[in-house]
Image (cartoon, helix red, strand yellow):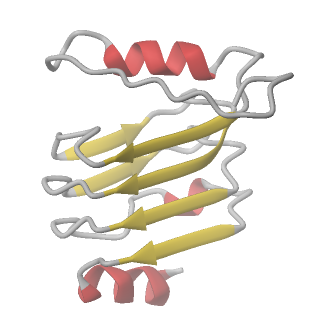
Protein backbone atom coordinates (compact mmCIF):
# COMPACT_ATOMS: atom_id res chain seq x y z
CA UNK A 1 0.00 0.00 0.00
CA UNK A 2 1.15 3.49 -0.75
CA UNK A 3 0.42 6.47 1.50
CA UNK A 4 -2.53 8.52 0.31
CA UNK A 5 -4.09 5.66 -1.67
CA UNK A 6 -6.95 3.52 -0.42
CA UNK A 7 -6.34 0.62 -2.78
CA UNK A 8 -3.31 -1.63 -2.85
CA UNK A 9 -0.86 -1.82 -5.70
CA UNK A 10 0.41 -5.21 -6.85
CA UNK A 11 3.73 -5.40 -8.62
CA UNK A 12 5.33 -8.68 -9.71
CA UNK A 13 9.11 -8.83 -9.74
CA UNK A 14 10.34 -11.78 -11.79
CA UNK A 15 13.63 -12.86 -13.29
CA UNK A 16 16.55 -15.25 -13.02
CA UNK A 17 18.39 -15.65 -9.75
CA UNK A 18 21.12 -13.14 -8.95
CA UNK A 19 19.61 -10.23 -10.88
CA UNK A 20 18.78 -8.12 -7.82
CA UNK A 21 15.05 -8.76 -7.37
CA UNK A 22 15.29 -8.92 -3.58
CA UNK A 23 17.47 -5.78 -3.46
CA UNK A 24 14.92 -3.93 -5.58
CA UNK A 25 12.01 -5.03 -3.36
CA UNK A 26 13.95 -3.97 -0.25
CA UNK A 27 14.57 -0.50 -1.70
CA UNK A 28 10.89 -0.11 -2.54
CA UNK A 29 9.77 -1.20 0.93
CA UNK A 30 12.28 1.07 2.62
CA UNK A 31 10.68 4.05 0.87
CA UNK A 32 8.77 6.35 3.24
CA UNK A 33 5.75 6.22 0.90
CA UNK A 34 5.23 2.48 1.20
CA UNK A 35 3.18 0.88 3.97
CA UNK A 36 4.45 -2.67 4.38
CA UNK A 37 2.75 -5.79 3.14
CA UNK A 38 4.68 -8.48 1.26
CA UNK A 39 3.47 -11.77 -0.24
CA UNK A 40 5.77 -14.60 -1.26
CA UNK A 41 3.33 -17.12 -2.75
CA UNK A 42 2.30 -19.21 -5.73
CA UNK A 43 5.78 -19.58 -7.13
CA UNK A 44 6.80 -16.00 -6.31
CA UNK A 45 9.86 -17.43 -4.58
CA UNK A 46 11.44 -20.70 -5.65
CA UNK A 47 14.59 -20.85 -3.51
CA UNK A 48 15.40 -23.27 -0.71
CA UNK A 49 15.47 -20.58 1.97
CA UNK A 50 14.44 -17.05 2.87
CA UNK A 51 16.91 -14.97 4.87
CA UNK A 52 15.84 -11.67 6.44
CA UNK A 53 19.03 -9.87 7.50
CA UNK A 54 19.47 -7.24 10.20
CA UNK A 55 18.54 -3.91 8.66
CA UNK A 56 16.29 -5.74 6.20
CA UNK A 57 12.83 -4.59 5.19
CA UNK A 58 12.31 -2.04 7.96
CA UNK A 59 8.72 -0.92 7.28
CA UNK A 60 7.19 -4.33 6.68
CA UNK A 61 4.10 -4.92 8.84
CA UNK A 62 2.65 -8.05 7.20
CA UNK A 63 4.43 -11.00 5.62
CA UNK A 64 2.73 -13.90 3.87
CA UNK A 65 4.78 -16.89 2.74
CA UNK A 66 2.78 -19.61 1.07
CA UNK A 67 2.56 -22.17 -1.69
CA UNK A 68 6.35 -22.42 -1.83
CA UNK A 69 6.98 -26.01 -2.75
CA UNK A 70 10.79 -25.99 -2.37
CA UNK A 71 11.22 -23.68 0.64
CA UNK A 72 13.02 -25.53 3.44
CA UNK A 73 14.06 -22.82 5.90
CA UNK A 74 13.41 -19.23 6.97
CA UNK A 75 16.01 -17.25 8.92
CA UNK A 76 15.20 -13.95 10.63
CA UNK A 77 18.05 -11.88 12.09
CA UNK A 78 17.50 -9.67 15.11
CA UNK A 79 16.49 -6.24 13.81
CA UNK A 80 15.42 -7.56 10.41
CA UNK A 81 11.65 -7.07 10.72
CA UNK A 82 11.18 -4.54 13.53
CA UNK A 83 7.58 -3.55 12.67
CA UNK A 84 6.21 -6.92 11.58
CA UNK A 85 2.84 -7.51 13.25
CA UNK A 86 1.41 -10.35 11.16
CA UNK A 87 3.20 -13.45 9.85
CA UNK A 88 1.34 -16.04 7.80
CA UNK A 89 2.89 -19.35 6.76
CA UNK A 90 0.92 -21.79 4.66
CA UNK A 91 1.26 -24.67 2.28
CA UNK A 92 5.03 -24.99 2.61
CA UNK A 93 5.35 -28.79 2.62
CA UNK A 94 9.15 -28.94 2.92
CA UNK A 95 9.65 -26.35 5.65
CA UNK A 96 11.86 -28.28 8.06
CA UNK A 97 11.75 -26.16 11.22
CA UNK A 98 10.31 -23.19 13.00
CA UNK A 99 11.61 -20.04 11.29
CA UNK A 100 14.99 -19.48 12.95
CA UNK A 101 14.93 -16.16 14.79
CA UNK A 102 11.14 -15.88 15.03
CA UNK A 103 11.69 -14.75 18.64
CA UNK A 104 13.29 -11.56 17.27
CA UNK A 105 9.94 -10.36 15.90
CA UNK A 106 9.05 -8.34 18.99
CA UNK A 107 5.88 -6.69 17.64
CA UNK A 108 4.36 -9.89 16.26
CA UNK A 109 0.64 -10.02 17.11
CA UNK A 110 -0.64 -12.65 14.67
CA UNK A 111 0.99 -15.91 13.64
CA UNK A 112 -1.23 -17.81 11.20
CA UNK A 113 -0.14 -21.28 10.07
CA UNK A 114 -2.05 -23.61 7.76
CA UNK A 115 -1.49 -26.61 5.50
CA UNK A 116 1.93 -27.32 6.96
CA UNK A 117 3.69 -30.54 7.99
CA UNK A 118 2.41 -31.35 11.48
CA UNK A 119 5.97 -31.67 12.80
CA UNK A 120 6.73 -28.04 11.88
CA UNK A 121 3.53 -26.76 13.47
CA UNK A 122 4.13 -28.74 16.67
CA UNK A 123 7.68 -27.31 16.94
CA UNK A 124 6.36 -23.76 16.59
CA UNK A 125 3.81 -24.19 19.35
CA UNK A 126 6.10 -26.09 21.74
CA UNK A 127 9.11 -23.80 21.33
CA UNK A 128 7.27 -20.45 21.46
Q: In the figure, residue 23 lies in which quadrant? A: top left
Q: In the figure, residue 27 lies in which quadrant? A: top right
Q: Which image quadrant: the C terminus?
A: bottom right
Q: Farthest right residue?
A: 4
Q: In the figure, residue 99 lies in which quadrant? A: bottom left
The residue drawn where x is 57% and y is 15% is 28
The image position of residue 48, as x and y in percent, is 16, 46
| Image: 83 above or below 104 | above
Q: Which image quadrant: the N terminus?
A: top right
Q: Is residue 2 left or right of residue 96?
A: right
Q: Is residue 86 left or right of residue 40?
A: right
The image position of residue 53, as x and y in percent, is 46, 33
The residue drawn where x is 20% and y is 53% is 71
The residue drawn where x is 37% and y is 67% is 90
Q: Is residue 47 left or right of residue 115?
A: left
> Viewer-proximal residue, 12 or 63?
12
> Viewer-proximal residue, 60 or 10?
10
The mark tally for this picture is: 0
The image position of residue 60, as x and y in percent, is 64, 38
Q: Farthest front residue?
A: 7
| Image: 58 above or below 65 | above
The image position of residue 78, as x and y in percent, is 56, 44
> Viewer-proximal residue, 101 or 61?
61
The residue drawn where x is 44% and y is 12% is 24
Amino acid sequence: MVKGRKEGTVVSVVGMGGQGKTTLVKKVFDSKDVIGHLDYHSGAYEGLGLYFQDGGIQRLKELYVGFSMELRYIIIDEGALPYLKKLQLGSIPRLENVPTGIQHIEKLEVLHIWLMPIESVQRIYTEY
